[in-house]
Image (cartoon, rainbow, N blue to C red):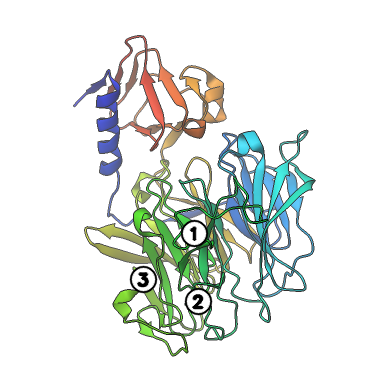
Amino acid sequence: MKYVLKNPISLIVFISNMILLHISAKDTTVVFNAVINTNLSSPIQVTHAGDGSNRVFVAEKGGRIKVFTNNYILTDTLIRITNMGSGNEQGLLSIAFHPNFKNNGYFFVFHTQATTYSLIVDRYTISTTDPDKADLMSRLPILNILHPTNTNHNGGEMHFGKDGYLYISTGDGGGGDDPQDNGQDSLSLLGKILRIDVNSTSGGNNYSIPPDNPNPLSPVYCYGLRNPFRWSFDRYTGDMFIGDVGQSAREEINFRAAGLIAGSNFGWDCFEGTLSHTTAAPCLPFNSYVAPIYQYQTNSDNRSVVGGNIYRGYAFPDLKGWYFAADYFSRNLRKIIKIGPSWIAVNQQMPETHTGMVDFGETEDGELHIVDINSNIIYKITTVNPKTVYTFTGHGDWMIASNWKDGVVPPDPLPSGSVIVIKPYNKGICQLNQDRTISMGGDFFVEPDCHFLLGNNSKLSID
């Protein structure tokens, strides 16, 4: 059947249907493609700047943030963070780029402090003369969260939400069994997901509290977490997935739909997964807490869950809609998908060398990567049947090569096995002013919240 799109309404309906049709419950074997295997030392996170440059940023536990091209070639070191604790679970833990980074140059780092063990969030600004270098004098303190006594359970990841606020995960303060009962203490900043507005200031802080936080005087947005080392937002929906490292009985993956995140209590330290846990904290019945969508028994070689992401890329359509997670001590790759009201999980054994996974991260085009801190390797998550993807990342005319990733305008007609993705920078516009055809077996997608226009009475024909 041929679709001929001539107006925005028919296009929106068509694209919505295409996205739904391409989410499959079929389990597909993942292939791990080593894309960066040199120039790294204890990598701990991989991410992107969201600025249309398609650069890849890798944070190292020891404090360096390295910059790679979209083809994974090292270009520079963005910054080296000093005065950090680096033993045990300490070090540089996360980097997050402001949603308007392309214009304001702001990025945020999350690390532990060397002598106090405090959790530090600072803002830096990119150099005005070098887009791959930070201005070292631009440091602006954002948060200094007291974390006395223990070096472990620091949480460790930051993301900006669709609302423009910065979200930060913190651990319960370390030690066994949450001795200070921080997880259930709504006044403590430990064992939480925090949410702050970094675009304004209030009360002497270099941030403010969003007025719709559960407590308008507190950064606390969710609580009841032990060590949410790795978590993510679904880039389509804003839903939240959290990998919460267990005590001695259960490792768990928690999920919360975007509209239900505020005030969520995930149960620790009243419950570890679905199991009751002895604590001095006041506890409610289990159904008062958010239950995990997936849990597994903690044992000697399967005892530190690493939360991941839903695959939202386009090169490997068989992976669409699957959520991926790992465990630092095991070779188990967990693949989870929701079918109707139920979450279905499949385990895949990774190669023997694949232990020490510490992060999943997306590049700007939505492709998913996994970080191996032991082997100093970044792997791209792939399958044996990739598609050729052409991604519009600029703003304006379809025919301008610089608006496309790698500077390549898609051929016409688009051949089978190819995909066009409309993802203009900062939710901009892509306008097609000539007739184009997508052949049978080719695909066309417009990313959520992005805009595609047909001008000059042009037509987009999809076989």
Query: CA–CA distance between discs 2 and 3?
Result: 20 Å
Could you say where residue 394 lies in the image, as x and y percent from the top left?
Answer: 52, 27
- Displayed quadrant of residue 443: top left
Q: What element carries label 3?
A: loop
Label whose residue precedes the other's in the sequence (2 or 3) = 2
- Displayed quadrant of residue 143: bottom right
Give the amino acid at mark 3: Pro
Q: Can residue 108 be seen in this view?
A: yes
Q: Indicate whether 49 appears above or below 391.
A: below
Residue beneath the point at 60% across and 35% down: 53
Label whose residue precedes the other's in the sequence (3 or 1) = 1
In the rendering, which numbered label is found on residue 216?
1
Q: Is mark 1 on a helix, strand or loop?
A: loop
Q: What element carries label 2?
A: loop
- Is residue 129 left or right of 300 when viewed as pictured? right
Q: Indicate whether 265 appears above or below 60.
A: below
Q: Do the residues labelled 2 and 3 touch (CB within 8 Å)?
A: no
| Quadrant (top left, top right, bottom left, bottom right) of the C terminus | top left
Q: Indicate whether 4 appears above or below 381.
A: above
The residue under label 2 is: 185
Query: CA–CA distance between discs 3 and 1?
Result: 27 Å
Q: Can residue 463 be seen in this view?
A: no
Could you say where residue 317 lies in the image, as x and y percent from the top left?
Answer: 36, 44
Residue beneath the point at 50% across and 53% down: 210
Residue beneath the point at 46% across and 85% down: 281
Give the amino acid at mark 1: Pro
Give the amino acid at mark 2: Asp
Comparing marks 2 and 3, which lies closer to the viewer?
A: 2
Query: What is the crowding at mark 2: few (fewer than 14 residues within 10 Å), some, or many (at least 20)?
Result: some
The residue under label 3 is: 292
Query: CA–CA distance between discs 2 and 1?
Result: 16 Å
